[in-house]
Image (tube, helix red, strand yellow):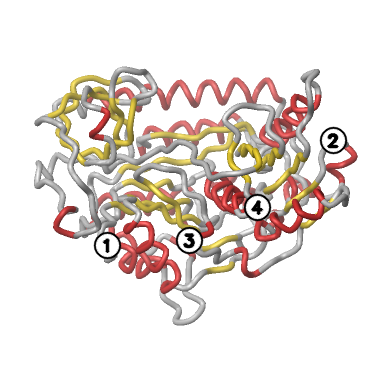
Amino acid sequence: MNVHDSEKMAAALGSLGCRPAETEPAEIVVLNTCSVREKAQEKVFARVEQLVGRGGERPQLIGVAGCVAQQEGEAIFGRAPAVDFVLGTQSLVRLPEIVRRLLDGETRIVETGRHPDNLDIPPEQIDRIPGVKAYITVMEGCDNFCSFCVVPFTRGRERCRTVSSIVREAESLAASGFREIQLLGQNVNSYRDPEDGSDFAELTDAVGAVPGIRRIRFTSPHPKDFSDALMDRFAAGGPLMPHMHLPAQSGSTTVLERMRRGYGRAEFLDLVGRARQKTPELALSTDLIVGFCGETRREFEETLTLLDEVRFSSVYSFKYSERPHTLASKRLPDDVPDPEKTERLVELQARQREIQLDLHRDLVGRKVEVLIEGPSRKGGQLMGRGPDNRVVNFDGPPAATGTFGEVRITGFGPNSLLGEPVSSLTPRPLTGDPADLTADPGDRDAAIPLPVVQAASGNGGRNAVRSA
């Protein structure tokens, strides 16, 4: 979500004649921030110190945007005096005006107001990172108020765009050559069209009908809003890929009650069971917090056994950190010692690593249709993702980037797969004509799905740099 917000800010700066700086120091630096965990927040202030303490010229303007900006407001100046402006989560549309005012001599501007037009920024005013996947914000904010979570305070209450505006953006992206769309929202599956009441399942139908869009993903849903209708969309085998990030947060019902998640362990497992009964190949990733307020060893072990029962394809795991304004910070003591949190996190990650190795071992020999994203991070190979969002590294020509290819899995590690092309990977035009976009039949029963990453873009003028 922050990556996409950075794309919006890049276009806003581009409207002033700015362009991304290829090297530092830049003249304008905007730090787009996250405050969902304390560690992410602290990195912001460390980065500001680096920018002004290098011994050379400091940037002409330094701004802090995003959730830390919304949360802290003017207090940021007290902790980081070098900061010139603070831009909240619903004020991105004000960025060009703020930069102009600062260049005209104003100082220390704070803008954390709520601007309705911030939700529905036209696609031509977004500086997309080149690649094969693009993001669309379908809603912002959250009404759940989980006891540990700062999002309702930094992103506000739920606000949804219309299906028609989202479809127009998807059409624009397809015409620009993007083949995968990721729908974004803090609680994305609670989406409702503000005009006609269409739900999230119906939204995926509308986006999936756009010619040229071959794959759809979304993040992040809430288990309590996972409808049978959405399960049916996964089972239909259309552009909605058989992978979903489904945050569990804990495997203990008593911890989930303290978290105010609205479901217990049994309900979560029932949801997973029903979803996989309809779509056996559905891969699930999740978020898990260890050391939440009052978590006992027994409660933590229930989270470990949740890993064993669900067998997630990947897990994002974190030590609990108290966040301002939340119910937990006001009513629940953060009483699990940090060394114990660390031990539990290491134990959980080790258990999940073994599960991922087992899952990947079972995929050897299978065929996967991958959307080729570009060079592998390991160098000398290409990287693509299949429907289940797993990364596959394989040999092939760089010019095949942006196309689909069939790969047989030949090896694995805990975080990615190795493969070999089933047939030669050759560049082919992807025009917007539906005839160019039909998938190769392949082995549909064996097919496994995967997602996409991207690299920076530019437009011309004053130097600027973005950081998410």
What residue would you read off at disc 3?
Answer: 123
What residue would you read off at disc 2?
Answer: 82
- Alpha-carbon span between mark 3 and mark 4: 18 Å
Q: Earlier in the sequence, mark 1 or mark 3?
A: 3
Tell whether 171 sits left or right of 72.
left
Q: Earlier in the sequence, mark 3 or mark 2?
A: 2
The mark closer to the camera, 1 or 4, is: 4
Q: Secondary structure at mark 3?
A: helix
Extreme residue in the bottom direction: 196
Badge 1: residue crowd in 10 Å (few <14, some 14–19, many ≥20): some
Q: Secondary structure at mark 2?
A: loop
Q: Is residue 464 above or below residue 58?
A: below
The mark closer to the camera, 3 or 4, is: 4
Q: Secondary structure at mark 4?
A: loop
Q: Secondary structure at mark 1?
A: helix
Residue 300 at what x, y percent from top left?
55, 32
What residue would you read off at disc 4?
Answer: 16
Q: Is residue 38 above or below residue 380?
A: below
What residue would you read off at disc 1?
Answer: 232
The mark closer to the camera, 1 or 3, is: 3
- Residue occupying image coordinates x 76% and y 54%: 100
